[in-house]
Amino acid sequence: MSDIEAKIEEVNRRFRKGSKQNEAARYIVRKNREIPADERKAICEQIPIAESTLRDLFTELRKMGVYPPEKTSEISYIPPTLEKPEETSHHVPEAPQPPLQEYATKEDFETLRNSINNLAALFNEEPSPNPGEDEDKEEEERIELIQPGELIIQDGSSTRESLYIKPKTRMYYDMSKQGAFHNYPGTRELGPFANFNGSMSDFFNKVVNDYFIRLYNADIGLTMRMPVK
């Protein structure tokens, strides 16, 4: 069965035989070409069939796929799919991963110690090279037998306090270490910060001592035993 005969069979199944639509559809399919406007008018006059009915008929034939006929010359050439040659797999060696260290090395301890020292410097505390010895000494100083009725005042004792440093105070401290306050203003008398290169604790103690001694003549420097009533 040819392609046209197959289309005629589809037209007969879709449109009732003997009807105007069936007759017009069979005519259109047999032509096996696009029907121009003037020929469409001739179909309307010969069958006869209404122009609106004929327009609907063309629409239905397009849906059925029997009109317009395929133009073999306009079918684009589709090249055959070429099989892609299998690429030989080359194993790319991965960069070797460094072995995991299960134990800390000497360099790790050095890095940790430097970090602790830097952190201590931020709080203006000079880290002690032997912290254990200092703690033992402080403990020995605290453990001292005091006889009943006596009070011991030691000028060399110290108490650790936490202070919040303002930016301006920090600037005074840095300027003191740079020699900005070498002499008292207007005199050649050396001040407490002459050749100063101490810590922040030294800085505060010198400021307090100089303030109270010069303004109030309050020089406290007792190392004695005194009875307590």
Image: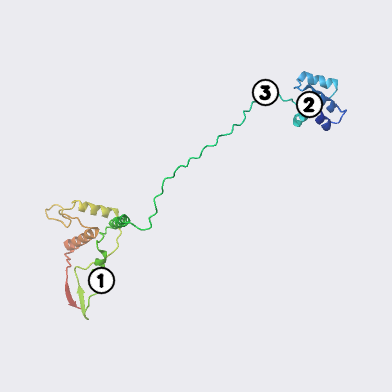
> Of residues 49 and 190, which is closer to you in this image?
49
Q: Amino acid at mark 2?
A: Ser
Q: Earlier in the sequence, mark 2 or mark 3?
A: 2
Residue 85 horizontal/vertical position (percent): 55, 34
* Number of other residues with Cα within 10 Å of mark 1, as a class: few under 14, some 14 to 19, many 20 or more: few
The residue at 80%/20% (across/down) is 41
Q: Is residue 174 above or below residue 49?
A: below
Residue 86 horizontal/vertical position (percent): 55, 37
**Would you say 33 lies left or right of 164 here?**
right
> Of residues 7 and 53, which is closer to you in this image?
7
Which of the labelled discs sits on residue 139, or is there none? 1
The quadrant of the rendering that contains the C terminus is: bottom left
Which of the labelled discs sits on residue 149, or is there none? none
According to the picture, the residue beneath numbered tag 3 turns out to be 74
Question: Which secondary structure lies at badge 1?
Answer: helix
**Would you say 78 lies left or right of 168 here?**
right
Residue placed furthest toward the left: 188
The quadrant of the rendering that contains the N terminus is: top right
Question: Which secondary structure lies at badge 3?
Answer: helix
Residue 97 horizontal/vertical position (percent): 41, 49
> Of residues 193 and 62, which is closer to you in this image?
62
Q: Quadrant of residue 141?
A: bottom left
Q: Earlier in the sequence, mark 1 or mark 2?
A: 2
